[in-house]
Image (tube, grey):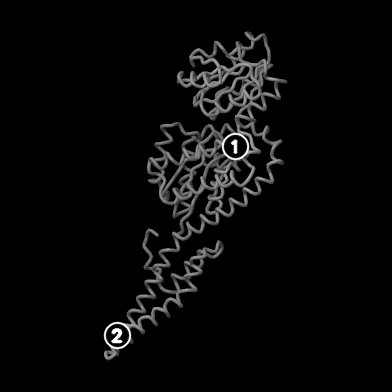
Amino acid sequence: MQREILIVGVNHRSAPVEIREQLTFSDSLYDQTLRQLPTLPAIDEGVIVSTCNRVELVAATMEGDCALETLTGLLAGHASLSQHQLSDHLSVYRGREAVRHLFRIAASLDSMVVGEPQILGQLKDCYARAAALGSAGTVLHRCFHKSFSVAKRVRTETGVATRAVSVSAAAVELACKIFDHLEDKTAMLIGAGTMSELAARHLLAQGIHGIIVTNRTFDRAVDLARDFHGMPVPFEDFPRFLHIADVIIGSTAADTYVLTPAVVHQVLRERKYRPLFLIDMSVPRNFDPSINDIDNVYLYDIDDLGGVAEVNREERSREAQKAETIIEEEVDTFWKWLTSLDAVPTIVALRDKVEGIRKAELEKTLASLRDLSPDARAALEAMTAAIANKILHAPLTHLKQHDRQREAFYLAAARQLFDIEDEEPDDQ
């Protein structure tokens, strides 16, 4: 058996928001599942990467096929979907492809808006929770920390980050397309997290007239409103202020709709049917999708923001290609380390095998040559050691090189040719 990294899940490329929100983990279930992962069949270590654009399970395993079945079943059961229903949207990455995928996520090359900075922080948070709960071990520890350093290198050596816009910026850019200008408009932020804070910064940069902030934790709404010279309102009262807002951005962790068609109809009457622009940046969604059927209301969700980024892709493609080259170099480096975990036991066993033969034969020879001087004995010891090292040099060099296509072949061949298969520990 060979160590493998496996990633199974859905993302914005493989599944629409309706499927992604079914797979979203609540806080309590997130931690419960993390604790459960290493106890499941074939799963040695596990991390859940859960953002608004993806829910992916990352696992280290020695039994890839069994682990794939385990993780697929876990996701299907969590979303109350059959494995057949889920399979149409499921993305699976194995081995080097899984490592590459994780590195591309960290470097924001797999984001809806390439280069957006939020994903790295989200990835670090996901790993930190897994490490704290003990579901991430040696392999994923090394893999995730390598992904963080890869992301830093990509941002330092390429222009991907400087040419990109965040999801929040894309939302504001979309608002600018709906309205000719924002200088006389008011925005309401429903939710005061990172996404809302970034949206507020971009709105102010576009000259928005005023900002209203509401949040379930009112102190947080007060803090954010103070930072942007806005007005905080208690969460239970925010519907009374909706008619003031021209732009409403939802970014809460609510698992039910906070805006419904009935509420929006009332707001439009109070606004004398002036246009209302809604952006739902949450998964699960905050705004009922049927709101989009109402005249003079423009509702966009997280998937719609991908279209805003489309216009920037050609400009970023050259820098992204540089980043892909960096990713490939770093995948090679990590893969050599990972495969060395499989090679080391074989190398040690091979050295022990040859050294054991050398010592046994030397002792037989020395036993029959009792009159040899200490210097002669030492010379024989040095000579046989040198012969053994020269014999081992070529096979050990090949085992350490980790040739992508032939590494498994070399390991199996060494074990069979030197008759050390039965000496491998069961857990290697």
Give the amino acid at mark 2: Pro
Question: Toward the viewer: 203 or 135?
Answer: 203
- Mark toward the viewer: 1 or 2: 2
Q: Is residue 139 left or right of residue 185?
A: left
Secondary structure at numbered mark 1: loop
Residue 124, compared with residue 4, is above or below; it is above
Give the amino acid at mark 1: Glu
As drawn, the label of residue 116 is 1
As drawn, the label of residue 374 is 2
**Residue 417: % across, % down:** 45, 74
Secondary structure at numbered mark 2: helix
- What residue is at 59 percent from the left and 45 percent from the top? 156
Q: Which image quarter: residue 299?
A: top right
Please identify the residue farthest to the front as the structure is shown.
375
- What residue is at 54 percent from the left and 43 percent from the top? 106
- Marks 1 and 2: CB-CB under 8 Å? no
Label 1 crowd (10 A; few <14 / some 14-19 / many >=20): many
**Residue 414: % across, % down:** 46, 71
Residue 269, compared with residue 9, is above or below; it is above
Which circle's residue, 1 or 2, is located before the other in the chain? 1
**Residue 158: % across, % down:** 63, 45
**Residue 143: % across, % down:** 48, 49
